[in-house]
Amino acid sequence: MSDCIFCQIAAKEVPADLVYEDDQVVAFRDINPQAPVHLLVIPRKHISGLDTAGEADLPVLGRLAAVVADLARKEGLEAGYRLVVNNGPDAGQAVEHLHYHLLGGRKMSWPPG
Ligand code: 5GP
Ligand code: ZN
């Protein structure tokens, strides 16, 4: 068993509110939502962050973006949404498995905190 919480969720060793899965990508609701819709969209493969994604990972990065757009439609986010990747300590990355935060259902402010 991996000691990475998101690998455990992808393997269904730890429960999560899954909203999408395919052979490469898994999406589930954030346990501590920061907006009415707050999904985490991850590659099944353990990639620690964007900066460690290699050439071979480019297809899954594209797929993550396509799944995000599809989920945004399914979640009714026609009015807009925000896609966030926290990469590294300055960004506050807490889980070292690449994940896209899909946030929507309320007005977002800019700049982000
Ligand atoms: P980060 O700060 O690394 O970008 O975000 C990690 C996110 O993962 C946080 O928003 C946090 O609430 C979420 N999270 C951490 N552990 C779990 C978990 O076990 N289950 C779910 N569903 N979300 C989690
Ligand atoms: Zn992992």
Image (spheres, rainbow, N blue to C red):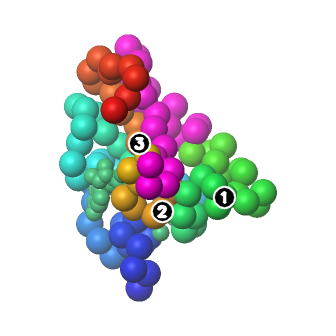
Residue 35, given in percent of the width and then of the height, sits at 25, 32
Q: Callout 1 environment at 10 Å: few (<14), some (14 to 19), or many (20+)?
A: some
The kind of residue tagged 2 is His
Q: Which residues are magenta?
A: 65-90
Question: According to the image, label 3 marks what residue?
Answer: 101
Residue 52, given in percent of the width and then of the height, sits at 64, 61
Q: Nearer the viewer, residue 107 or 26?
A: 107
Using the rendered image of the protein, determine whether residue 22 is visible from the camera's viewpoint.
no
**Could you tell whether 63 is left or right of 68 in the image?**
right
Between disc 2 and disc 1, whose residue precedes? 1
Q: Quadrant of residue 109?
A: top left
Q: Quadrant of residue 16?
A: bottom left
Q: Residue furthest right?
A: 55
Q: Which structural element holds mark 3?
A: strand
Residue 53's tag is 1
**Could you tell whether 89 is left or right of 75 in the image?**
right
